[in-house]
Image (cartoon, rainbow, N blue to C red):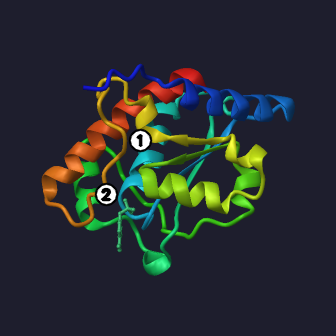
Amino acid sequence: MNHITKPTSSGLRAVEIARSKAEAEKRPIRILFVCLGNICRSPAAEGIMRELTKGMPDSFRPKLDSAGFYGGHAGDLPDRRMRHAAFGRGLHLDHRSRVIRTSDFDWFDLIIGMDDRNIDDLHEAAPSPEAESRIARMSDFAVHYPEADSIPDPYWEGAAGFEIVLNLLEDACAELKKHI
Ligand code: 4NP
């Protein structure tokens, strides 16, 4: 069994670099959550983080957004199953799916992928090594799930898959919030 210490040092390093960028420009950190379709995992992460940070003063509250690599759902609300599962936890998800752009790597300080494929795609799409240094893996912050190395794609799974995703994301977002 792997014993992974979380949050991982690589995740914390990306957050630290991202924070320095925001602090140098004297503004709140900007975080982009990224998955494949931008209708399940990343809009849920965005919604959870928005809820967790809503009480913060304007000058500190992070700017949040989400995007995906696959454009087949562009303009759509999150998947009905994810909206339903999130609603059960008091979250209203109203993000509209969009494809990630190269300019996102400049605008956002921290870019967070959900699984190996997202992370590989982000490294490929990043315009510079500096931008690559600000890519993090969401599961690196899931401290109560030390064995989780991704937020698994729930799209082809049953309802339980959406609850697992939300459990992981709630844990990871709560931990991430402590470091931003
Ligand atoms: P997501 O889930 O990446 O968490 O938004 C998916 C949504 C749609 C598809 C795949 C994954 N799709 O193939 O359409």
Instruction: Please say if 160 is above or below 77.
Output: above
CA distance separating discs 1 and 2: 17 Å
The answer, for residue 59, to whether it is visible in the render is: no
The amino acid sitting under disc 2 is: Asp
Mark 1 beta carbon near ligand 1 (under 8 Å): no
Tell me the residue at 43%/46% (across/down).
45
**Ligand 1 quadrant?**
bottom left
Number of marks drawn: 2
Say few, some or many: other residues with alpha carbon within 10 Å of mark 2 (under 14 / 14 to 19 / 20 or more).
Answer: some
Which quadrant of the structure image shows residue 94? bottom left
Q: Which amino acid does label 1 sit on?
A: Ile
Q: Mark 1 points at which residue?
A: 48
Residue 163 at x, y = what percent?
A: 21, 46
Of callouts 1 and 2, the N-terminal one: 1
- Tell me if residue 138 comes above or below residue 87 in the rendering: above
Residue drawn at x 39%, y 64% is 39
Residue 161, percent from left and from top = 19, 52
Q: Quadrant of the N terminus?
A: top left
Mark on residue 153? 2
Left-right relation of 58 to 6: right
* Ligand 1 closer than 8 Å to label 2 CB: yes
Query: Is there any visible trace of residue 124 in the rendered image?
Result: yes
Residue most toward the front? 1
Q: What residue is shown at x 45% (from left), y 25% (from top)?
A: 175
User: In the visual, does 53 lie left or right of 73?
Assistant: right
Q: Is residue 7 left or right of residue 79?
A: right
Q: Where is residue 139 in the image (x, y as percent from the top left)?
A: 40, 37
Q: Quadrant of residue 14?
A: top right
Name the outermost residue toward the right: 25
Could you say whether the residue bearing mark 2 is in a helix, strand or loop? loop
Q: Which type of secondary structure does the marked residue at label 1 adopt?
A: helix
